[in-house]
Image (cartoon, helix red, strand yellow):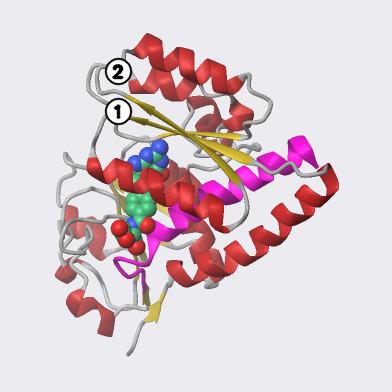
Amino acid sequence: MSALILDGKALAQKTEEALSVRVAALKEKSGGQTPILATILVGNDPASATYVKMKGNACHRIGMGSMQVELPSSTTTEQLLTKIEELNSNPNVHGILLQHPVPAQIEERACFDAISLEKDVDGVTCLGFGRMAMGEKAYGCATPKGIMRLLEAYDIALEGKDAVVVGRSPILGKPMAAMLLNANATVTICHSRTHNLPGHILRADIVVGAVGKPEFIKAEWIKNGAVVVDAGYHPGGVGDIELGPLTQRVAAYTPVPGGVGPMTINTLIYQTVDSGERKIG
Ligand SMILES: Nc1nc2c(c(=O)[nH]1)N[C@@H](CN(C=O)c1ccc(C(=O)N[C@@H](CCC(=O)O)C(=O)O)cc1)CN2
C-alpha cells in the first residue's frame, strides 16, 4: 500500500492564489487598503526570526501588508503589553502575531491574552480558545487549524474515529484536541505522564505528533492504515514521528518538511485576510 501524502506546501501555495485575489479585490474596493499583519519578535532566537520572516514573506506574496516589531531580549512584560495595546488600537492593523517562545522573564500568557479577540488571527488567546472549544466563532490556533484545513482538503474522515494527540501545549495539543472533538472524533490526549503511551497510539485511527521531541513517537506504535500527522520540525528535517517505515503501511501522512509547517503560516495569513475583510470590506 502506498500512502496518500498530505501535501501542506502544495495546499498552501494553492490557497495563496485565492488569497491574492481576495486581497486585490479588497484593495480595489477600498481605494488601496490591504489587510495588515503585525508580527512581534522578542529577542534573538534564530529559529523564531526565521519563522517571523517567513510570515512576512507570505504576506508579501499575497499582496498583503505586514508590520514587523522587533524588541530586545531584555523586554519586560509591561513593555510588551504596552506594544500590544498600541497595535490593538491601531485601526490599520488587522492581525497581531506574537512569536512564541518569548524570553523567560516575560509572562507569555498575559501577553497572548492582551491581544484583542478581533485581531487574534494566530488563535492564541484564552478567550479565542474557549470560544472555539464551545463551537463559537473565533480564529483557530494557527497550527491545529492548519492541520484541520489540510485534513479537510484531503477528505480525511474524522467522525467517530479514534484520534490520539500526543502533546498538550496551549497553542498546539490542547486546541488540536478540541478541534478534533468538534469534528466528532473520539479524542485521547497523551502527555509526558501518560502510562502505556504505545498502547494508546496503537489504537489510533489518527495520530497527531505534537510533543516537540525528534522522532519521539516510534513507527512500531502506529497501526496499519492510520492517518499520521506530524506537527514537529527538528534539525535534520525530522518530525516528532519516526516516519521512514510508515510511508508504506499507513493510509496518509504529512511529510516533514512540507506538511504541517506551511499550513501554519497559511492559516495565519488566511485568518488575517478574513479579519481585513471584516474591517475594510
Ligand atoms: N505565535 C506562534 N508561535 C509559534 C507558532 C505559532 O503557530 N504561533 N508555531 C511554531 C513555529 N512556526 C511558526 O511560528 C512555524 C514552524 C515551522 C514552519 C514551517 O513551515 N516549517 C517548514 C520547514 C522550515 C523551513 O523550511 O525552514 C516545514 O515544515 O515545511 C512554519 C511555522 C512555534 N512558534
- Looking at the rendered structure, the kind of residue marked 2 is Ile
Residue 164 showing in the rendered view: no
List the residue tagged with mark 1. 102
Task: Give the x, y percent position of residue 5.
Answer: 39, 77
Instruction: Compute the Cα span from label 1 to label 2.
Output: 7 Å
Q: Give the residue at x 24% y 43%.
A: 46
Q: Tell me the magenta residue range.
A: 253-281
Q: Give the residue at x 77% y 38%.
A: 280
Q: Main secondary structure of the magenta part?
A: helix
- Looking at the rendered structure, the kind of residue marked 1 is Val
Residue most toward the bottom? 1
Q: Give the residue at x 23% y 48%.
A: 211
Q: Is residue 155 above or below residue 22?
A: below
Label 1: how many residues lie within 10 Å, few (<14), some (14-19) or many (20+)? many
Task: Give the x, y percent position of residue 91.
Answer: 68, 25
Residue 124 showing in the rendered view: yes
List the residue tagged with mark 2. 106
Q: Give the residue at x 67% y 39%.
A: 275
Cβ–Cβ under 8 Å for marks 1 and 2: yes
Q: Is residue 255 magenta?
A: yes
Task: Give the x, y percent position of residue 74.
Answer: 25, 17
In this picture, residue 199 sits left or right of residue 25 = left
Task: Give the x, y percent position of residue 185.
Answer: 48, 56
